[in-house]
Structure formats: structure tokens, C-alpha cells
Image (spheres, rainbow, N blue to C red):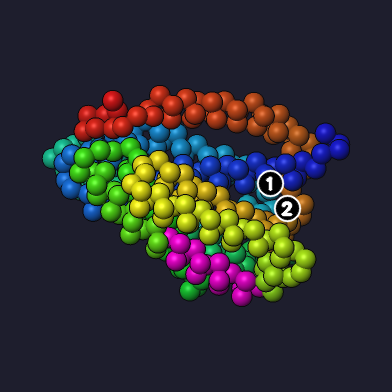
């Protein structure tokens, strides 16, 4: 253990948990965002059934990411949470509303219209909150003497709103691509049309956020454009262009699975770009991962548990997706 930097290991674990949450819960949040565009009845029922076996398990990664941040990087947790309290409260309330709505729309059919609205509202609020929080962290958090020194609304800015809308658009595109893959009949036709609309919108928002980020801080600019580092960082936008090309060609060809996989690849490249911009800071330009890290003994103790529990989560998650790998109808998978 002495030859391994456990702080970096924990940064990678939390980064993996956050990315797993974004891609796994992203598409079912996207389905909630798109829900009002689906016809009442068979289309909405197919959409719900497509995520019924996995939606709650997807949020396991949010618990791991948040709990891991608190345990492994307590100083960062103590700074980021006060800086984004309104967003975190809104996100949790959104997730609660959509979770309750998911269950009650089946058990309370007389008020299904209300629960459908709650499902959509919770999904939109959760997605926007996550995107705005990301923008707030990227634009910088005021820190003095190891504590948050800003105000209640410092997170609100044109850039954070841009990242919020970008993530909302990305989640909606993921949700449409998932439905295009998993549903059939009218629901699939509608989903295919939505992917054709949302995929270009997601690419446009990705370009807008990428173009704005280097102007937030000179350090971001230097990491992306200084020579010789630009020879490596330039591979990220190149890969984005390749994935976008494959995505659009697959949509034209009428593919079902490939558009979803390409959108996941784009999210991965965005995550890599985020890492390039901020590493080794956990609170950009203020606190590094080593500044925020818990004591070595605490990291070692937690790592022993993480090495046991993470493979179990991966196994049961993979098994769930494998068992429900087919198409879904009005009454479930077949």
C-alpha cells in the first residue's frame, strides 16, 4: 500500500462512481424528461417498463459517489456542499418525486396524470440541478481558510445555466436512444424521431460548453492549448468528432443499439475532458485531492470495503441488464 497513492486511487473510484451514475441514471432521467412527448397509454407504459428493472439500482452509484466524497475527501465535501446546497436539495427532491411517481402511477391509476407530471418534473429538476452544480464547480468556488466563503446564490451564472441545459439535453438524447433500442412500434418510431432531433442539439451544447470553459480560467486554457500538451488534449475533440460522425451515420442507417453506445462514448469523452480541465483539483484552483484527502488509515480501511462491494455492484448490475436485454412491450420484457 505504501507504494500506491491511495488519494489518487480514491479520486479514480469516485470519478468512476460519478460517471457510472451519469450514464446509467442519465437515460432513465432522460425518459422522464421526454415523457410528456409520449402518447398516454401504450407508449408511456413501454417507456416505464423499459427501465423498471434497473432504474433504482442505477442510483446506487450516486450514493457511492456522494458517500465516497464525504469519507475520502471530507474537506472537499465540506466546501462543495455549502456552495451548492440549493442545487443538492432540489436534486434530491426531484429524485424523490420521480421515484414515488414511478411506483404510484401503477398503483393509483385514477391520478396517473398527476404522477406522470411528477415523474417529468422530478426528472427535469434533478437533471438541471446536476448540470448547474457541475458548472458552479467548474467556474470556481470561493474558499477562505479551508471553508466556503461565498453566498447562497454564487452557483447561479450564465455558464452554470449553460451546463445545466447541456446536461438536460444530453440526458434527453440518451433517453431517446434507449427507447429507440428497447421499445417497438409507435414508441420506437417516436423515439427515433427524438434522437434525430436531440443528438445534434446535444453536440451543439457540447461545443458551446467546451468553447466557454477555457475562458473561465487561464489554467483551463493552458491545459488544453499549451504546447506540447495540446498534442494529447487534441485527441479528445478528434474522438468526439469521430463518435459524432458514427452516431449520425448509425441514425441514418436506422440502427437501434449503436446510437445509444455512441452517446455513451460522447459522455465518456466529456468526462475525460472534465478530468483534463480540473485534475488534480477537487475544488478547482483552491483545493487539490491531496489537500482534501482523509488520513491514510481511513483511506486504507475504506478501500478494503470498496474492493469487496464495488465488484458485487458491478456483477448484479451487469446481470440485471443481461436478464432484461430484449425488447419491451406494454406488459414488460419479452
> Which residue in the structure is indicated by mark 2?
289
Disc 2: CA contacts within 10 A as few (<14), some (14-19) or many (>=20): many
Which sits in the foreground, 178 or 162? 178
Which numbered disc flags the more N-terminal residue, 2 or 1?
1
Name the residue rendered at 40%, 40% in the picture. Answer: 257
Residue 137: percent from left, percent from top: 59, 62
Residue 276: percent from left, percent from top: 67, 58
The reply to whether callout 2 and callout 1 are in contact (CB within 8 Å) is yes
Answer whether residue 195 is magenta in the image: no
Residue 208, compared with residue 232, is above or below; it is below
**Element at badge 1?**
helix
Residue projecting furthest to the right: 2
Residue 14: percent from left, percent from top: 63, 44
> Which residue in the structure is indicated by mark 1?
11
Q: Indicate left or right for 43 with 245 as reference.
A: left
Name the residue rendered at 65%, 55% in the picture. Answer: 275
Q: Can residue 55 be seen in this view?
A: yes
Magenta span: 202-217
Amino acid at each position: 500500500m505504501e507504494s500506491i497513492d491511495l488519494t489518487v486511487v480514491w479520486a479514480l473510484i469516485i470519478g468512476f462512481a460519478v460517471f457510472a451514475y451519469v450514464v446509467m441514471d442519465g437515460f432513465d432521467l432522460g425518459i422522464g424528461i421526454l415523457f410528456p412527448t409520449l402518447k398516454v397509454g401504450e407508449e408511456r407504459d413501454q417507456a416505464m417498463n423499459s427501465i423498471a428493472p434497473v432504474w433504482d439500482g442505477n442510483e446506487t452509484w450516486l450514493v457511492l459517489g456522494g458517500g465516497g466524497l464525504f469519507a475520502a475527501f471530507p474537506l472537499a465535501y465540506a466546501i462543495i456542499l455549502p456552495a451548492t446546497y440549493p442545487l443538492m436539495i432540489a436534486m434530491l427532491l426531484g429524485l424523490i418525486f420521480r421515484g414515488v411517481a414511478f411506483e404510484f402511477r401503477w398503483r393509483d391509476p385514477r391520478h396517473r396524470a398527476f404522477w406522470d407530471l411528477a415523474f417529468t418534473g422530478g426528472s427535469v429538476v434533478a437533471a438541471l440541478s446536476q448540470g448547474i452544480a457541475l458548472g458552479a464547480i467548474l467556474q470556481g468556488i470561493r474558499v477562505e481558510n479551508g471553508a466556503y466563503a461565498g453566498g447562497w446564490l454564487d452557483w447561479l451564472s450564465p455558464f452554470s445555466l449553460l451546463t445545466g441545459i447541456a446536461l438536460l439535453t444530453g440526458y434527453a438524447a440518451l433517453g431517446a436512444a434507449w427507447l429507440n433500442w428497447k421499445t417497438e412500434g409507435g414508441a420506437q418510431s417516436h423515439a427515433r424521431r427524438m434522437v434525430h432531433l436531440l443528438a445534434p442539439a446535444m453536440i451543439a451544447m457540447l461545443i458551446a460548453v467546451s468553447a466557454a470553459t477555457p475562458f473561465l480560467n487561464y489554467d483551463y486554457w493552458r491545459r488544453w492549448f499549451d504546447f506540447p500538451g495540446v498534442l494529447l488534449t487534441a485527441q479528445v475533440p478528434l474522438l468526439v468528432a469521430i463518435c459524432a460522425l458514427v452516431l449520425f451515420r448509425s441514425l441514418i442507417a436506422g440502427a437501434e443499439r449503436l446510437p445509444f453506445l455512441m452517446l455513451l462514448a460522447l459522455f465518456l469523452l466529456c468526462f475525460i475532458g472534465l478530468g483534463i480541465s480540473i485534475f488534480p483539483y477537487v475544488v478547482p484552483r483552491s483545493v487539490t485531492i491531496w489537500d482534501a484527502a482523509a488520513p491514510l488509515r481511513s483511506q486504507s480501511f475504506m478501500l478494503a470495503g470498496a474492493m469487496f462491494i464495488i465488484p458485487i455492484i458491478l456483477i448484479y448490475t451487469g446481470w440485471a441488464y443481461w436478464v432484461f436485454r430484449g425488447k419491451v412491450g406494454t406488459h414488460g420484457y419479452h
